[in-house]
Image: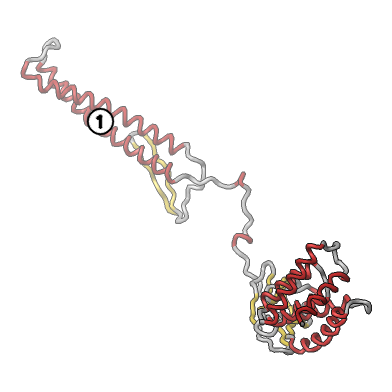
Amino acid sequence: MRLVALCLGLMCMMSFATPVWAEPSEADRATARALALEGHGALKNKDYTTAADRFGRADALVHAPTLVVDWARALQGLGRYVEAHEKYELVLREGVDSSAPKSWLRALEDAKKELEALKPRLGWVTVSLHEPAEATVRIDGVPVPPAAIGVKRAADPGFPEVTVSAPGYEPFKQTVTVGPGEEKTVEVSLRKLPETTSSRITPLNDAYRPRRKSDTRRVLSYATLGVGAASLVAGGVTGGLFLRKRASLQDECIDVKCPHTSTKKLSTYHLYGYVSGVTLAVGVAGVGTGLVLLLTAPKAEETASNGFTVRPLVGLGTIGAEGTFE
C-alpha cells in the first residue's frame, strides 16, 4: 500500500511540476518516475550512493521538492552534510504553493525539520589569509570565493584539507580535524619563493652574444697541423736520403747508364724520391689546412674558464702553439 501511495504521489507531482528550463516530455516524466522508485528502494536499503545518483538524475529531468528532499537525505547518509544542507535550503527558498499536492507540502515541512536537525552536525572552517593578499584557497578541492575568505565556511565533519596557492609563493596544505558543530581556524602566511639566478640575470641579445670556439674545430686544427708537420719531417728525411743516393749513383753511372750491380741502389733511389714527394705534399696540405681552420675560427673569447689561453705560433721554420695563464 505504501508503494502504491508513493506512485500516486509521484504522478501528482509530475502533473503539477513547474519546469525550470523547458517543459519535460512524457518520456522524461516516465524516466523520472522510474528513477525515483529506484532511489527510494536504494534509500530504504541504505545504499546512499545509488540513491543520491537516482534522485539527482530524476530531479534533473523533472524538478520537484519531493525529489530534492530525498536527494538531501541520500547525501546526508553519505556524510556530505554541506550539500545536503544546500538541498534543504533550496526547497525552502523556492517554497511550495498552498494549492500544490500534499506530497509537496509534506516535503516542505520535512525540509524545515531536517534542516534544523542537520545544522548542529555541520563543521565550520575559517581560513585567515595574511600573506599574500590574493591567493587561491580550496577546501577539499572546492575553491573558496574571495568573499568567503576570513569568515567561517561550512565543512563536512571529518578531515577537510585546506590548500592555498599563489604565483611566486610556496603552496600551503593542511588537514584539519573538525567534529560536528566544531569551528576551526587556519592561519595562512605563504612563504615567498627565492628568486632564481635566471630571473635576476638579463639575457644578452643574440646579436651581441659572443660566439664560442668549437672544441671539435680546435682539436681538428691541431691534429691536422700535427699530421702536416710530421709529414714535412718525414719528407725532409726521405728527401735527404734521396739526394745521398743520387750522389752515389752519379759516381757509379756513366752517361745515365748504371751497371748491373747498382740495380738495388737505383730501386732504393726511386723509392726515396717517391716517398719524399708524397710526404712533402701531404705535409704542405696538412699544415695549410690546419692553419686555415685555426685562423678562420670565430673570434670568440680565447680564454677558458681556468684562465688558459692558446694561440697558434707560425714562423720561419717553426709551426706550433703557445699558451699563457692569466
Place of residue 26 in the rendered image (x, y in percent of width and height, measured from the top left): 81, 63
Q: In this orientation, does residue 84 appear?
A: yes
Residue 69 horizontal side relative to residue 192, left or right: right
Quadrant including the N terminus: bottom right
Nearer to us in this view, 172 or 179: 179
Nearer to us in this view, 111 or 191: 111
Is label 1 in a helix, a strand or a loop?
helix
Give the residue drawn at x 82%, y 76%: 8
Query: Dividing the picture into quarters, in which one does residue 164 lie?
Result: bottom right
Which residue is farthest front?
A: 1
Which residue is farthest left?
A: 261
Relative to 76, does residue 32 appear above or below in the rendering? Answer: above
Give the residue drawn at x 83%, y 76%: 65
Relative to 24, does residue 233 appear above or below in the rendering? Answer: above
Q: In this orientation, does residue 86 appear?
A: no
Place of residue 276 in the rendered image (x, y in percent of width and height, measured from the top left): 24, 27
Give the residue drawn at x 88%, y 69%: 18
Nearer to us in this view, 104 or 197: 104
Residue 210 horizontal side relative to residue 81, left or right: left
Give the residue pinned by disc 1: 236
Query: Dividing the picture into quarters, in which one does residue 166 lie?
Result: bottom right
Residue 87 horizontal side relative to residue 276, left or right: right
- Which amino acid, by three-letter code, is at mark 1? Gly
Nearer to us in this view, 11 or 284: 11
Residue 268 horizontal side relative to residue 88, left or right: left
Tell me how many marks there are: 1
Give the residue drawn at x 11%, y 18%: 251
Place of residue 93 in the rendered image (x, y in percent of width and height, measured from the top left): 87, 77
Relative to 317, does residue 218 appear above or below in the rendering? Answer: below
Dot 1 crowding, Cα within 10 Å, few <14, some 14–19, many 20+:
some
Place of residue 227 in the rendered image (x, y in percent of width and height, measured from the top left): 32, 37
